[in-house]
């Protein structure tokens, strides 16, 4: 009985210890769960913190990269030669024509004067062709366009015979064989003025100045051609491009030559250009002054059909706005 009583006491003690151990285990499990929960929360918080830091570092790196790229570009802009905004001249003047086109006197002198203007103002490229054929103009113009780049200014100059037909506006280079000016075949002998303008715009030219010392109508077998109007009005210029067309005359008028050796229009254009200081811009007020001086010139008079007297009325047309032109 004593042994049984002792054994029962030991059993009761063991049961109590087991219950206490189970309680401890439950407590430990609860504490472990709390630690796990806190650890998970800490991991999530750390991940969020690291993500935020990484995003901040990425943003900072991007900003730093952008800053450095901007700095490099600024250094390049300051130190590298400026290859944009250059100025180029392509001109041709034609005195020599086969019948029935009349011989002209001043066109070659006009284009030489334009070449001298380009040289005086340090133009990057200056092509000034004298009495070229159509094949020569096309070949030289192709080579010229290779020099034109984005942002450049191009001056296109023409003095010589030409026509404004239903098929388009034509420049007529010098001819060595007769040309039937009343036939559609005359188109094959001419160069569409828009082709020249489009050629330099396609190369990225930002501003194109067209100067035309020529008639807009032929009379008694004597005429000097037109490059402006007509087809140009139907063309949509690319955004950011400016084309300005200076014409010696208005429609149905003739362009006169000055006995001093230049076309009346070219003479006044260059006379005004040469008064501008280096670095100046050509503005609308300058255009207006040139127009007035041509009208006032005594040699700007001519006779219409029926010997009706008239006077040159030069015109200027702006496509893409009225910009300030850095010609000088």
Image (tube, helix red, strand yellow):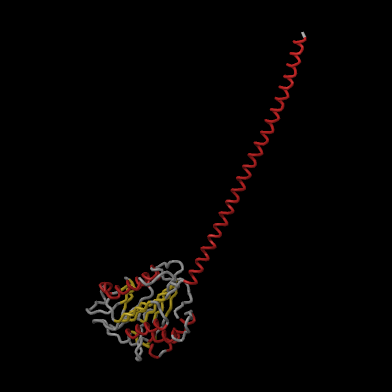
Location of the C terminus by quadrant is bottom left
Quarter of image, res 42: top right
Q: Residue furthest front?
A: 3
Q: Residue 41 at what x, y percent from top left?
A: 64, 41
Q: Is 218 on the left-hand or right-hand side of 86?
A: left
Give the vertical position of 241 relative to 312 (above or below): above
Q: Residue furthest left?
A: 177
Q: Report the residue at 46% width, 77% height from top.
A: 326
Between 56 and 123, the one lying in front of the other is: 56
Q: Report the residue at 29% width, 74% height from top.
A: 190
Between 33 and 297, the one lying in front of the other is: 33
Q: Is 285 on the left-hand or right-hand side of 181?
A: right
Q: Residue 143 at what x, y percent from top left?
A: 32, 72
Q: Residue furthest top?
A: 1
Location of the N terminus by quadrant is top right
Quarter of image, res 108: bottom left
Q: Residue 8 at what x, y percent from top left?
A: 75, 13
How many numbered marks appear? 0
Between 104 and 230, the one lying in front of the other is: 104
Q: Residue 56 at what x, y percent from top left?
A: 59, 53
């Amino acid at each position: 009985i004593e042994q049984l009583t002792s054994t029962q006491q030991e059993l009761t003690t063991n049961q109590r210890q087991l219950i206490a151990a189970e309680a401890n285990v439950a407590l430990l499990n609860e504490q472990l769960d709390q630690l796990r929960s806190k650890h998970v929360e800490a991991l999530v918080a750390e991940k969020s913190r690291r993500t935020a830091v990484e995003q901040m570092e990425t943003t900072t790196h991007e900003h730093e990269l952008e800053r450095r790229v901007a700095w490099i570009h600024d250094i390049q802009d300051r130190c590298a030669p400026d290859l944009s905004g250059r100025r180029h001249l392509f001109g041709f003047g034609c005195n020599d024509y086969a019948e029935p086109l009349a011989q002209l006197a001043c066109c070659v002198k006009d284009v030489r004067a334009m070449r001298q203007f380009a040289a005086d103002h340090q133009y990057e490229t200056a092509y000034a062709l004298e009495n070229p054929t159509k094949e020569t103009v096309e070949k030289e113009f192709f080579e010229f366009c290779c020099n034109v780049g984005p942002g450049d200014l191009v001056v296109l100059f023409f003095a010589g015979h030409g026509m404004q037909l239903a098929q388009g506006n034509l420049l007529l280079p010098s001819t060595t064989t007769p040309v039937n000016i009343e036939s559609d075949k005359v188109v094959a002998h001419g160069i569409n003025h828009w082709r020249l303008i489009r050629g330099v715009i396609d190369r990225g030219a930002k501003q194109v100045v067209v100067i035309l010392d020529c008639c807009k109508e032929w009379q008694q077998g004597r005429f000097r051609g037109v490059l402006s109007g007509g087809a140009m009005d139907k063309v949509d210029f690319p955004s950011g491009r400016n084309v300005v067309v200076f014409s010696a005359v208005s429609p149905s008028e003739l362009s006169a030559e000055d006995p001093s050796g230049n076309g009346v229009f070219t003479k006044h254009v260059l006379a005004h250009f040469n008064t501008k200081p280096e670095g100046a811009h050509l503005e609308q007020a300058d255009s207006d002054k040139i127009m007035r001086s041509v009208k006032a010139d005594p040699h700007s008079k001519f006779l219409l059909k029926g010997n009706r007297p008239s006077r040159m009325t030069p015109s200027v047309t702006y496509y893409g706005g009225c910009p300030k032109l850095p010609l000088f």
